[in-house]
Image (spheres, helix red, strand yellow):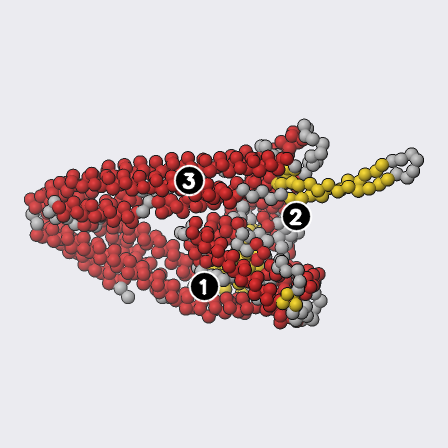
Amino acid sequence: MQQENIQDLLTELTKIETSLSQDEKNHLLSESYVQRFHQELMKVKTYATEILARDRLMKIGIVGQVKAGKSSFLNALIFDGEDILPKAATPMTAALTKIVYGEKAQAEVFFYTPHDWENGIERLAGRYQIIYDEKKRRWQSQQKYASPILPVFDPQSITREVEQEFPSEAAAHQLVEMSQKCDITVQDLPVSKIVPINNMQEDLKAYIGAEGTYTPFVKYLVLQIDKPFLKGLEIVDTPGLGDPILSRSQKTNDFLIQCDLVFLLSVTSQFLNRDDLALLQNTLPAEAVQEAVLVGTKFDQALLEDPSRNPIPLKEAVGATRRKIAQSARSTLERERARAPQNKILKKVQGSLPPQFASSILYKAAREIKEGRPLGASESHILSQLESRFTGMEQGNSKLLMGLANIDNLKKKEFDKVHAEKEQLIAKRSLEFASEKRRHFLQQLDDMQLEAEKCLHTIQTEDLDTLRKKLVDSQNAMRSMHKQIRTAFEKCGLDTARQLIAMKNTVNQLMEEFHDLPIKLDTRIHHRTEKHWFRKDEHWTEFDHIKYAEVSEVIHNINAFVTRAETNISQNLQLAIDIDRIRNEIKQIVIQAFLKSNAEFNEDDITGPVELVLNQVTMPKFQIVNRNTYKDMIVEQFQNGVVEGQDIHQLAMAQECVLSQIASDITKRLEQQGKEIQTTLEEQGLTFSDNIKEKIEDRVHLLEGYMQDRQQSAIAFTDFLKRLEGYKDSLRI
């Protein structure tokens, strides 16, 4: 299916919708049919736009947590290991970078607008300063009465706390601080700017480098480079999902939703850890992953974590490390899928197993050796470590290092696949899309045609007495099934409430995953002197090993628990109300009631009210009122950000209390929400029969009106049926 054919389909459907709306105004068609047609057409337009965009470029995303090695991976993948993409000043201020093919190297840089800056970034930065000053005031107030052995005021500790608790404000603050070191302001900048590239590494520093003149003002940039394998592709280096700068985050999400292929990066030594899983389940848009490649980065680090003390063969270590990580990833994803079976991202990632492994630093070393260039300090260090640990490791063997790095294999496999299947993929998706939608709308028109034929038949063959008898029979049927309908809804409401209450156990189980409080070790040096009058003074050094814990770890656990609980419950809520089961059960009750009454009826007249009622039963979004309340419970008790000695135990106990409070509040909300849903369904059960009755009465009265002028009505319906047939002909291939 070509672009113009998809557009033709949309044009034809829009014309049909306009005509059907007029038919509905002329009382030839029920409003419910027109609403269904309109709703489906809106969905089609949205998805068709996406398809048309994909027909231009195949989109590839690079996704991962901070320090997952996204930029290094891209430098290896695209720039032969050279550090072309400079590192941002901080993860929070990194810009989204798109990379496309261009015969002439250049970058189109898009800047924040003055509105973005003044009403978004500066406002958030102002809030940061208020939060920071208040935390500093609290800490200083506490220190007036503190023991002298406690650490002195540490601004970095407060900064870390604010960054953890208020990431949006912290990111904005960092951008403003960076901007104050620049000689320009956002008012001096255009919306976008074309930058010629002569020396890519140097020319980009001004826009996305740590000390770049324009870095704080850059929203995103599009980089054009002359690399033939990029033809027809668009690659993006994301600044990290959950970007606190909203306007930038939206750009990232918009791109990812359109991606045909996504590389999901995770550091091999901590593969698919808690933060990675949170990204996959809570942050990454569900529509973002059509095809996924799971990549374990920094594979060299995982190799060096091998516990063997004696040197072992490199090949053996590589195989064992890959198998171990792959098995762990499989188990992790199986466990997460069991907890969240409806999560589309997890399903797609699970289907991409086993993971690929890559090492950007080994790739860079291999390129340097192959081209006769001296190794950098980082590359030399890694190679020396590997050689000392594994037999068969040859520092000067570029082919061996290339194989370990796996960059070329990964690029060839995935990029060649994208290039080879591009047209096929686009054509397949377009054909499937158009064919499916044509069939769907043809079915809707068939339903309308059947309804119109029944109306015409009634007008031509029945009399008013027969019609009125049908109304009486229907009313009798309504009365006979009223109790059954009410009972069915009540039962469904009760079952749903029970399921929600049963989720309390799940919440308590989830809580057990967030009790860890890392204990760290700090060494303090004390220089001692003892003076003697009779001999030379003595000097010595004492070392105190102090255990400590950071309050930010508890804040992280609180955030993670709340997020995980909300996600888990929301997913279970979608399963709690079985709409299809209700629909089928109610439909059967209605049909059986009419059959027993020997009343003649149109099934569509009965199932229509069912749909209306069920559409009113909406799935509530489960959300804890204010998670900051729980954070404050910790911060108010431990204001300096670091605890030592016995205070570590107090911090752990405080964490236990807060987590338990969160679990208690959630379970109370579950009970409340269960009661709310139960009440809603019970109310629907009471009014459902009346809705059917009203619908049938409306139809009978409408037919009575038609029969006042049978001839004119018959002509109108005959013409309408001809139009419907014409609509169907226009949609047939």
The amino acid pointed to by label 3 is Lys
Say which of 529 and 632 sits in front: 529
* Residue of label 1: 56
Eye-nearest disc, 2 or 3? 3
Say which of 9 and 629 sits in front: 629
* Residue of label 2: 182
**In the current view of this chain or complex, which residue is farthest to the right?**
534
Q: Earlier in the sequence, mark 2 or mark 1?
A: 1
Q: Position of residue 493 (x, y in %)?
A: 30, 40
Q: Position of residue 586 (x, y in %)?
A: 23, 45
Q: Which mark is residue 504?
A: 3
Side (left or right) of 330 relative to 169: left
Q: Residue at x 43, y 68 (%)?
A: 423
> Looking at the rendering, in which quadrant would you find the C terminus?
bottom left
| Inter-mark Cα distance, 2 to 1 | 38 Å
Side (left or right) of 553 relative to 486: right
> Looking at the rendering, in which quadrant would you find the N terminus?
bottom left
Q: Residues within 10 Å of mark 1 (few under 14, many from 20)?
A: few
Q: Earlier in the sequence, mark 2 or mark 3?
A: 2
The amino acid pointed to by label 1 is Arg
Would residue 249 be visible to someone looking at this image? no
Q: Position of residue 174 (x, y in %)?
A: 61, 45
State the SS at label 2: loop
Asked if the residues shown at circle 2 and circle 1 are in contact, with their CB atoms under 8 angstroms apart, the answer is: no
Asked if the residues shown at circle 2 and circle 3 are in contact, with their CB atoms under 8 angstroms apart, the answer is: no
